[in-house]
Amino acid sequence: KNEVEQSPQNLTAQEGEFITINCSYSVGISALHWLQQHPGGGIVSLFMLSSGKKKHGRLIATINIQEKHSSLHITASHPRDSAVYICAAASYNTDKLIFGTGTRLQVFP
Amino acid sequence: NAGVMQNPRHLVRRRGQEARLRCSPMKGHSHVYWYRQLPEEGLKFMVYLQKENIIDESGMPKERFSAEFPKEGPSILRIQQVVRGDSAAYFCASSPGTGLKDTQYFGPGTRLTVL
């Protein structure tokens, strides 16, 4: 069993839909990261959180430390949101990242 | 303030050659992480370095791979005697090193192809 599990693996949506991607982890963490990887391969850090909720534009990330679970939400999705979304647990001692397998999102107009 | 820089962006090597991948962290950042993404697979941690020190190399293959982050200059990931299975995207990330829970900033990656 992977230390960081994501679901779903693939997700398609119509423009405007509300999207949720889930992440569960089994290791002790200092923080949980959400990353975005575009088709060109570049990686952008979206959020780093260790408790509660963070919001940036149409993106919202939440974490429940007791349940070892985090969610990434996209409101009013747009085709430009199409990418792979990766959650990563930062190791408690060193901050090295343990990655989930990613969720490939495609948003159609 | 330039972001994390990696070069080359693309590198082609023949089996048995050496590959040297460079990573210049963001200005003021003293922590560097290297990650590898094999084709159709997820990202995997390789090594974590601070200036002149390897902190955690638990993800590095035991042979042929080495990394350094000298006092001056970029961090270098070195792969000796490359094999086809080394073909992958190699990303580095840097953080300021102010403590745990630092955001890591990723470079654009180096795509290594071994012929």
Image (cartoon, rainbow, N blue to C red):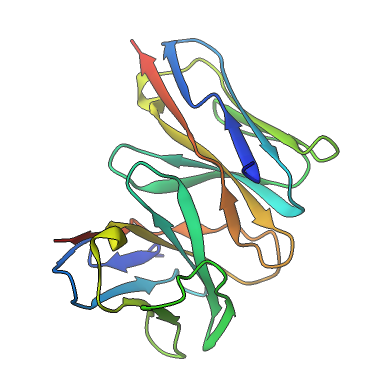
Compared to residue B83, the image places residue A55 above or below, namely: above
Residue B113, percent across and down? 20, 59
Compared to residue A77, the image places residue B100 above or below, namely: below
Compared to residue B98, the image places residue A38 above or below, namely: above
Q: Residue at x 46, y 75 (%)?
A: B62
Does residue B13 appear anywhere in the picture? yes
Q: Which residue occupies the extreme right position in the image? A: A66
Q: Residue at x 67, y 67 (%)?
A: A94
Residue B79 falls in image quadrant: bottom left
Q: How many marks?
A: 0
Q: Residue at x 67, y 71 (%)?
A: B98
Is residue A69 shown left or right of residue A22? right
- In-front residue for pair A83/B42: B42
- In-front residue for pair B18/A51: B18
Is residue B85 shown left or right of residue B1? left
Rendered-image quadrant of the C terminus of chain B: bottom left
Rendered-image quadrant of the N terminus of chain B: bottom left
- In-front residue for pair B38/B84: B84
Q: Residue at x 25, y 77 (%)?
A: B81
Compared to residue A77, the image places residue A87 above or below, namely: below
Does residue B30 appear anywhere in the picture? no
Residue A60, percent across and down? 63, 29
Residue B7, percent across and down? 26, 68
Is residue B59 shown left or right of residue A67? left
Residue B92, percent across and down? 42, 64
